[in-house]
Image (cartoon, rainbow, N blue to C red):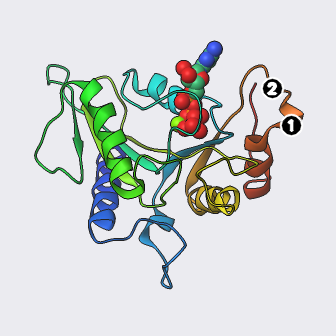
Amino acid sequence: MATMESLIGLVNRIQRACTVLGDYGGSDNNSFSSLWEALPSVAVVGGQSSGKSSVLESIVGRDFLPRGSGIVTRRPLVLQLHQVESDAQEYAEFLHIPGRKFTDFALVRKEIQDETDRLTGKTKQISPVPIHLSIYSPKVVNLTLVDLPGLTKVAVEGQQESIVQDIENMVRSYIEKPNCIILAISPANQDIATSDAIKIAREVDPSGSYME
Ligand SMILES: Nc1nc2c(ncn2[C@@H]2O[C@H](COP(=O)(O)OP(=O)(O)OP(=O)(O)O)[C@@H](O)[C@H]2O)c(=O)[nH]1
Ligand SMILES: [Mg+2]
């Protein structure tokens, strides 16, 4: 078990190093194979406003992700959870602000919003460049989670016509990695037969198991 913990810690460090070196794992401009392909993670996938960020928050047990109606998550968020000793203080740290420890999780949410806007402006546009966040807490298990923009069907005002396909391509670039566990989210009031999350998850991983 101790060996497994240190292995996961090593994977977390390699993922951080990849991102620092400009390897985001996206498939768009990489002509060479990404090291991300080999590293395990759990990615949420589902329609816009289906509750993906809310599910991730409940896994972490903290209120820190932008949530709401409309298009909220507009850049991938790579979230590394690091378990620390039981008496240690819980804090968060962004890769783009090294050394600054966030203990107020409302400020973490604000920084995710601000950092999203830095690349996209206060628009309804998306960017495939991930935000990298680590949370150090005694209450989490060592795990890498990825929050992704929601799948949509039509471009709304202020969005390019290509956004529907752009989002799907971005989502696929994460969930098609061999070591990605797909967490497909559908609202409880939606008929599962019409779920985009299940559809794309089945396409990518036909042998996956499903729970309701
Ligand atoms: N009633 C109800 N509302 C929920 C539940 N989970 C999330 N919500 C609400 O649904 C809205 C969308 O939730 P988000 O977690 O932002 O959804 P998302 O899938 O991350 O949305 P995008 O990032 O825009 O794709 C928010 O207003 C949440 O408060 C739930 O279980 N029940
Ligand atoms: Mg979201």
Q: Is residue 33 left or right of residue 175?
A: left
Query: In this picture, is 11 found above or below 138?
Result: below
| Quadrant in which residue 14 is drawn | bottom left
Query: In this picture, is 24 found above or below 64?
Result: below
Q: Nearer the viewer, residue 145 or 70?
A: 70
Query: What residue is drawn where x is 46% and y is 51%?
Result: 75
Question: Is ligand 1 within 8 Å of the beta carbon of the residue shown at mark 1?
Answer: no
Secondary structure found at label 1:
helix
Q: Nearer the viewer, residue 179 or 164?
A: 164
Q: Tag 1: residue type?
A: Thr
Q: Tag 2: residue type?
A: Gln
* Residue highlighted by disc 2: 190
- State the quadrant of the C terminus: top right
**Residue 50 x/y as whole percent:** 65, 31
Question: Is ligand 1 within 8 Å of the beta carbon of the residue shown at mark 2?
Answer: no
Q: Around disc 2, counting alpha carbons within 10 Å, would you say few (fewer than 14), some (14 to 19), or many (20 or more)? A: few
Secondary structure found at label 2:
loop
**Residue 157 x/y as whole percent:** 64, 48
Query: In this picture, is 202 found above or below 69?
Result: below
Q: Residue 96: which disc?
A: none
**Residue 123 x/y as whole percent:** 48, 48
- State the quadrant of the N terminus: top left
Query: What residue is drawn where x is 69% and y is 39%?
Result: 47
| Quadrant in which residue 119 is drawn | bottom left
Q: Around disc 1, counting alpha carbons within 10 Å, would you say few (fewer than 14), some (14 to 19), or many (20 or more)? A: few
* Residue highlighted by disc 1: 194
Q: Is residue 93 left or right of residue 22?
A: left
